[in-house]
Amino acid sequence: MSLRYLTAGETHGPQLTAIIEGLPSNLNIDFEELNFQLHRRQKGYGRGRRMQIEKDQANFVGGIRHGYTTGAPVALVVENNDWKHWQKIMNIEPIEGSDEEKRRVHRPRPGHADLNGGLKYNHKDLRNVLERSSARETTVRVACGAIARQFLAEFGIKVAGRVIRIGEIEAPYQELPIDELIAVTEASSVRVTDAETEKKMEAYIDQIKQEGDSIGGIVECIVEGVPIGLGSHVQYDRKLDARIAQGVMSINAFKGVEIGIGFEAGTIRGSQVHDEILYSEERGYHRATNRLGGFEGGMTNGMPVVVRGVMKPIPTLYKPLQSVDIDTKEAFTAQVERSDACAVPAASVVMEHVVAWEIAKAFLEKFGGDSMEEIRANVASYQAQLESY
């Protein structure tokens, strides 16, 4: 069975829900660590007041007993603390009242799903679209990814992330051991490895916010310890780098993905792109460099997986943009009461968990098994095969 999940819930509804299917039995779940990952998603310089309202915590309601998965679907919920202010507006039962009381939305915001979703689903109240299309949904995507992350850790696979750029400011690239990278970026308000760049980015975000605007950036995810051979070359939809790219592009506001050196590969010669193959008794087959980001032919090659994603500026602005009222068809300028000026550091955390999920899914496809014990035996057998190759 393939690893998969479904999510449900709205940004101002009572809760967000996820059901995960395909997890093996006997995986020990560290609840404190999982909630720590949810907390990381809420941090970062430039976030708005919503992050002061919500203190996300995952509550499990199925599939786990005494701290271990049972092999049944895992069900989890994350309550929305702001729900108490929205109970009437988001009530599932019919309510009487004016559009104002229902807070009906008839003015679509540029850059959001509002108008497209309204047209597609024939909604005259665009709240039915924006409540679900909100990035709030990434809360439970991080929760699912955090479980995948714990599964990968059982096999020595580590996941890290960092911010590469926010707007005009690029962080100097530092090669650090993955444990150090995790620690340094976690201590940074903008998830960079350089203190001077952190200060510049904070001042820049303040400036952007003061001007009523927003700013995006570029984030990177690194995964170490991934075995050779996850994914496959035999069909387009089994190529793991392609599946990771799809997962990253599904994150709200992401508009581009690259693996390894990515788009730079189109500007330099082949001799500067491809990674030479080496062999030693200690490491077996490995690469002299990692320009291809841990992939060849859609399969992992044993080098660290390196993925970058670009996040556009958040479209909810204090600075007015023009739109059209769906009732009157008249032009208006879209304005809001609150917004994040920059959510790039949080997006870095979301991308870590999206990538972790796709790698865990491919790992289970490769090694199979209904229990952790069976999977460990399959991994050990494969490692013996690689060592004797």
Image (tube, rainbow, N blue to C red):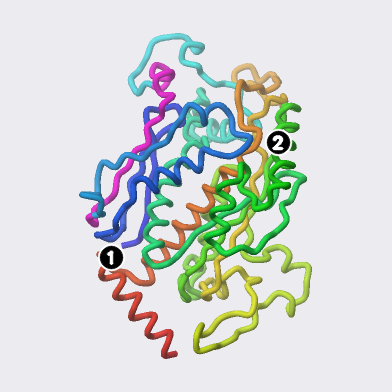
Whichever of labels 2 and 1 marks the residue nearer the N terminus, that label is: 2
Residue at point 42%, 65% (across, down)? 362
Q: What amino acid type is highlighted by mark number 2?
A: Ile
Q: Quadrant of the N terminus?
A: bottom left
What stretch of residues is rendered in magenta? 70-90
Question: Left or right of 18: which side holds 326?
Answer: right
Q: Residues within 10 Å of mark 2 (few under 14, many from 20)?
A: many
Q: Please state the horizontal and vertical placement of residue 86, each as a whole percent of the image.
A: 43, 20
368 versus 317 height, above or below: below
Residue at point 25%, 65% (across, down)? 370
Question: Left or right of 288: which side holds 283?
Answer: left
Residue at point 42%, 67% (across, down)? 156
Question: Left or right of 338: which side holds 82?
Answer: left
For residue 372, the mark is: 1
75 versus 338 height, above or below: below
33 versus 88 height, above or below: below
Residue at point 72%, 68% (across, down)? 265
